[in-house]
Image (cartoon, rainbow, N blue to C red):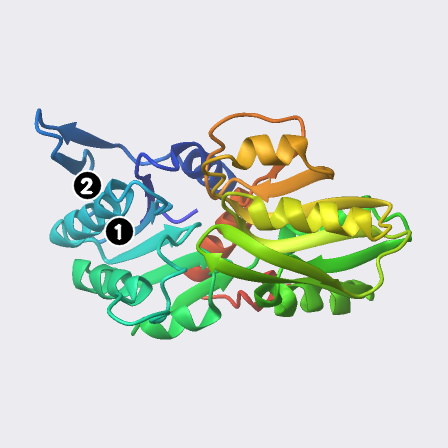
Amino acid sequence: MSADVKIFTGRATKKLAEKIALSYGKNLGNSVVTEFSDGEFEPSFEETVRGKDVFIVQSTMPPAENLLELLLMIDAAKRASANSVVAVIPYFGLARQDRKSKPRVAIGAKLVANMLEVAGVSRIMTMDLHADQIQGFFEMPVDHLYASTIFIPYLQTIDTGNLIMAAPDAGGAKRANSYAKKLNLGLAMCHKQRKVANEIAEMTVIGDVKGKDVILVDDMVDTAGTLTKAADLFMEKGAKSVRAFCTHAVLSGPAYERIENSSIVELVVTDSIPLKKQSDKIKVLSVAPLYAEVMKSLIKHESISSHFII
């Protein structure tokens, strides 16, 4: 591989970065973070990046320090005369804040895009944004990858000949429909109503799932309230089994307990966010080989369209 490529990582997704570097065929670059007694921190590169194409791997899930660390590393690379700086952000935090959902709120995703540009990033690589239009917030190339690239091959290994794709809510209908078309399967969905965030008031099923092995797909699983309630509802409607495929394992609050107590047979996620704890019901598929291949194609100025399944 090119000697002009260097791969670094923040502290949030170090294990994933190590896998990406291994798949790429490079050693992970040497960087350290100095912490001060008041909580302030300062990332630094412990090797030259002058004239290099620098990739910085860091998901930006909470706490906000993860985003700040990425911004500081981008700024440090630019000030150290890197040729280009690519931010590899497997999970793009604040993506749910892509519009004003009510008066007097911020558009957080746009603000993050502005900060990344000001920091000096040359390009963004991310996966399964909560809203596709976030790509338009950037005045630079955005490589928006899809977990379907690794989910679909796994789905084909468990194909019972009786599968049906499903969305846990109306917002995920487009994604589930894309899977259904690709795999030539039927489609079902749940319609939910909320009164407050993270709390479902009512949910109904649209479509016939009786006797079917249901495959729920979504971009993320947070508190798992929607996902588990949808799974239980599908089972009530006569489904044979329910599996869930979610790109980003946010898994906050009562998520793990809900998944363990639900009718979900298996929850398949990627390693875009490290799991807080292990569960027999949760299977992790790594996105490292995909990112490594896309990074190689970028350096070689080759097309990456073959890496997009959906």
For label 1, the residue is 52
Q: 228 or 219: nearer the eye?
A: 228
Quarter placement of the C terminus = bottom right
- Image location (x, y in percent) of residue 57: 36, 45
For badge 1, the amino acid type reads Lys
Any mark on residue 48, and which?
Answer: 2
How many neighbours does mark 1 have within 10 angstroms: few (below 14), some (14-19), or many (20 or more)?
some
The vertical placement of 192 against 68, above or below, is below
- Image location (x, y in percent) of residue 283: 64, 35
Q: Residue at x 23, y 58 (%)?
A: 83
How many neighbours does mark 2 have within 10 angstroms: few (below 14), some (14-19), or many (20 or more)?
some
Tell me, yes or no, whether the two marked residues, 1 and 2, touch with CB atoms within 8 Å. Answer: yes
Q: Quadrant of residue 102?
A: bottom left
Q: Quadrant of residue 299?
A: bottom left
- Residue 54 visible: yes
Q: 143 or 298: nearer the eye?
A: 143
